[in-house]
Structure formats: structure tokens, C-alpha cells
Image (spheres, rainbow, N blue to C red):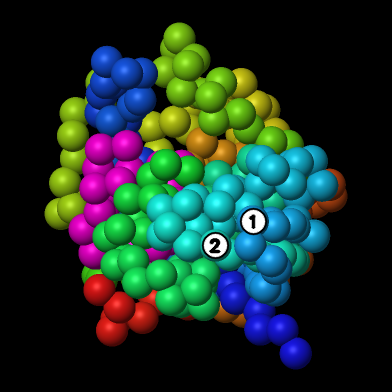
Amino acid sequence: MSISYPAPAKLNLMLRVVGQRPDGYHELQTVFQFIDFADQLQFSSRPAGQFSRSGGAATVAEADDLSIRAARLLMENAGIQEGVHIHIDKVLPLGGGIGGGSSDAASTLIVLNRLWRTGFTRQELMALGTQLGADVPVFIFGQSAWAEGIGEQLSALAEVPESHYVLVHPGIAVSTREIFTAPELTRQHPPSTIGAFLGGVMENTLQSTVCARYPEVESATQWLKSHGLRNVRLTGSGACVFGVAEDASSARIIAGQVPLPWRSWAVKGCNRHPLFDPAEQ
């Protein structure tokens, strides 16, 4: 029987754009936390150089899938001859700001590094992950984190409450590129601090731009607020929004009331990635 490996979603509990680099990338401050909502991946050995995928997102070509790209990248950098078939039970929505593709890529790097015995350290895997996307390293880092730079400068943040959330996807996909290139986006917010975040400063400075361009996101935000959830905000560049519930039961009840065609989930924050192994350095 094949073993399934989780690729969990993440939330940005705060996100602040504090500058823009000459290469066009934005300087950020953000707090990442994982949630107990995940894709599931299975890996089967294939002859050297053969890479294939089943399941996954139907709108993403196999060659473009981040999990396939991650497997090839690991093989090439390890200087080995391997192949793999990856089956993805895809439940995380595309364009939701919860890191589905990045998480799939990270779990692929973590698992194949073990199965292929390539011996890369966690930091080396994170460096590979950066080549695939700015969100990939945090899933390999494996702990809730304060992040700076483009999101790759990570510091563990164990003090984050593992809250119960209601997560809502309002049935659309938000283009990250569109939001970060929007002329009205403010790119020079004053830097924040970990202390400010822990004291309750949790805004996402992309939210006003996303809500103005995507009324469905604004509607979902207001719906969550009207149902008594706390700290309602956007994750990443959207489209998903979330709020803090009092407990698991409250989260399930509110999630069950979300109007169609929106989708919703009652989820819990997790400060450790399910594949994190503290013995691995």
C-alpha cells in the first residue's frame, strides 16, 4: 500500500509590504502558520529520468506542476539518476493564497530527499525551494515563522496561538502578479516587529487592493465579520479569507453556513509541519 504524505496549507497571519527591490520583487514582513488542511501526495519509483503525475490540478500541465519541477530539481542537484511518479490528491484551491502548489513542491523535496537518500540538509532544501517559489522554503523550514525579505528569511515563532479558524474561498482565483503590479498598491509601509504582531497588529496590507479589485473577496470578508469571527483578514494575496473562531465547534457551525458557491473549511493552526523532523538539520 502506498504511503500518503501531507502537503498542508498555510495562512499569512499578517503580511506587510515594506519596500520593492530593483529586480521588482517586493520586500515583505509576514507570519506563516500551517493549518490542518492538506493535499496528499504518493510517490512511486520510476526508471531514471521518467517523471509523471496523476491527480493534481487539471488546469496545470504536468511539466509545469511544481511537484514535478521539484523532483527534477532535486535529482539534477544531487547528481543522481532517479525517476518518480507523483499522485496528488488535490484539495487545496488554486489561487487561494494558502500555498497549495508551493506546499506540494516542498513535500516532494522533503520526501524524495529521504527516499532517494540524497542527504541534503534542511537549509540546502530550502535553497532549492527558493528556485521554485518564494513560499516554498517555509514549508521545508517546518515551523511557524516570522519572515522577511521576499519571504525566505525565516525565524521560528513558537508563540503563535494554534487557533481555530474558518477559512472561506469565495469561488474566484486572485492573480498574485496582478496585485503586486497594481499601481495603487502601497509599497512602502513602515516595518513592523514581532512584538507588534504578538500584541495584535495583524493587518494584511494587500487586502484593500484585493478587495477593491475582487468584490467577492470583500463580500466574504464582511460575511465572516458579521458572524462574529475575530481578526478577519486575507491570506497571502488571496482569494481566501479567514477569521478566528472561539473553538472547533463554533468554527464548524459557521463554516457550515457559508453561502454557495463559496467553499469553507473549519481548520486549526499548527505550529509544526506534519513532515517536520527535528532530528534533520
**Neighbour class for label 1 at 10 Å: few (<14), some, many (≥20)?**
some
> Can residue 280 be seen by looking at this rendering?
yes
Reply above or below: 237 against 31: above
Q: Amino acid at mark 2?
A: Gln
**Where residue 64 appears, x then y in whole percent?**
66, 41
Residue 269's mark?
Answer: none
Q: Under tag 2, what secondary structure?
A: loop
Along the line of sight, which residue is nearer the eye, 254 or 5?
5
**Where residue 98 appears, x then y in whole percent?**
55, 51
Say which residue appears at 48% left-offset and 62% top-offset.
Answer: 80
**Where residue 108 appears, x then y in whole percent?**
54, 63
Q: Look at mark 1 in the image and give the residue it sits on.
A: 49
Q: Under tag 1, what secondary structure?
A: loop
Image quarter hosting the C terminus:
bottom left
Residue 87 among magenta residues:
no
Say which residue appears at 44% left-offset and 12% top-offset.
Answer: 184
Say which residue appears at 74% left-offset and 46% top-offset.
Answer: 62
**Where residue 145 appears, x then y in whole percent?**
29, 59
> Can residue 267 be seen by looking at this rendering?
no
**Marks 2 and 1, how far apart at CA:** 7 Å
Report the magenta residues as a range. Answer: 133-157
Residue 153 among magenta residues:
yes
Q: Look at mark 2 in the image and give the residue it sits on.
A: 81
Q: Which comes sooner in the sequence, label 2 or label 1?
A: 1
Image quarter hosting the N terminus:
bottom right
Reply above or below: 122 against 19: below
Along the line of sight, which residue is nearer the eye, 79 or 114?
79
Along the line of sight, which residue is nearer the eye, 220 or 179?
179
Q: Answer left or right for 71 relative to 170.
A: left
Q: Are marks 2 and 1 in contact (CB under 8 Å)?
A: yes
